[in-house]
Image (cartoon, rainbow, N blue to C red):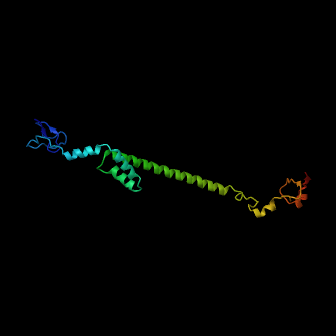
Amino acid sequence: MSKFCNHCGASVGEEDRFCTVCGKPITAEGGAEQPKAPHAESQKKEELDREPITVGGYLIMFLVMCIPVVNLVVLLLWAFGKNGNVNRRNFSRAALVYIAIGIVLSISAVLFFVGIFANAVQYQQYHTYEHYGNPYRNDWEYYDEYVYTPDSTNDFMYSITEGDAPVEDLELYDITISNV
């Protein structure tokens, strides 16, 4: 009949003075003749930790995930709590990984589009006529100063090759006006 260690419950030989598993000395009384019976409560708890989650359990989990802020707290408790179902723990850890990936992608997308918008605004500011010293004003009130439009009573076409000028100044440029 074999003996058992008083400390860890491992089987030891009749002549052994030390336990081969935990290394503790075997007492002179010879150790226990029977192993300690494992507690039924711990076995039952272990079985519950490994038991699959039912459909109703998953529905409740997903409903809890719909509540802002509460979902993060519950996920952290389920993922890093010492007690609880293994399936729920793994689900929570996977959900936290997805949340982290979503946050990183969201921040990257926002920074990308903010950069594009900022670049477009800068392009608009520095690529206008006013920036390059355009001599023409951008106001409609000065439109007639720069562009000559013939009256509707005159039926002639005009062409100006040296720039826009009123009809009075056409003689300066030697421009001929021809009737069409």
**Residue at horizontal 35 percent and vertical 45 percent from the top:** 55
Quarter occupied by residue 138: bottom right
Quarter occupied by residue 144: bottom right
x, y (%) of residue 73?
Answer: 37, 55
Q: Residue furthest bottom?
A: 141
Question: Looking at the figure, which quarter contains the N terminus?
Answer: top left
**Residue at horizontal 43 percent and vertical 50 percent from the top:** 99
Q: In the depicted view, which residue is nearer to us: 68 or 56?
A: 56
x, y (%) of residue 170?
Answer: 89, 58
With respect to residue 121, does 2 lie above or below? above
Horizontal side of 32 relative to 142 (left or right) equals left
Horizontal side of 176 relative to 163 (left or right) equals right
**Residue at horizontal 80 percent and vertical 60 percent from the top:** 146
Q: In the depicted view, which residue is nearer to us: 126 or 107?
A: 107
Quarter occupied by residue 4: top left
Q: In the depicted view, which residue is nearer to us: 56 or 101?
A: 56
Q: In the depicted view, which residue is nearer to us: 32 or 76?
A: 76
Q: Residue furthest front?
A: 56
**Residue at horizontal 31 percent and vertical 45 percent from the top:** 86
Horizontal side of 67 relative to 6 (left or right) equals right
x, y (%) of residue 125?
Answer: 65, 57
Horizontal side of 153 relative to 29 (left or right) equals right
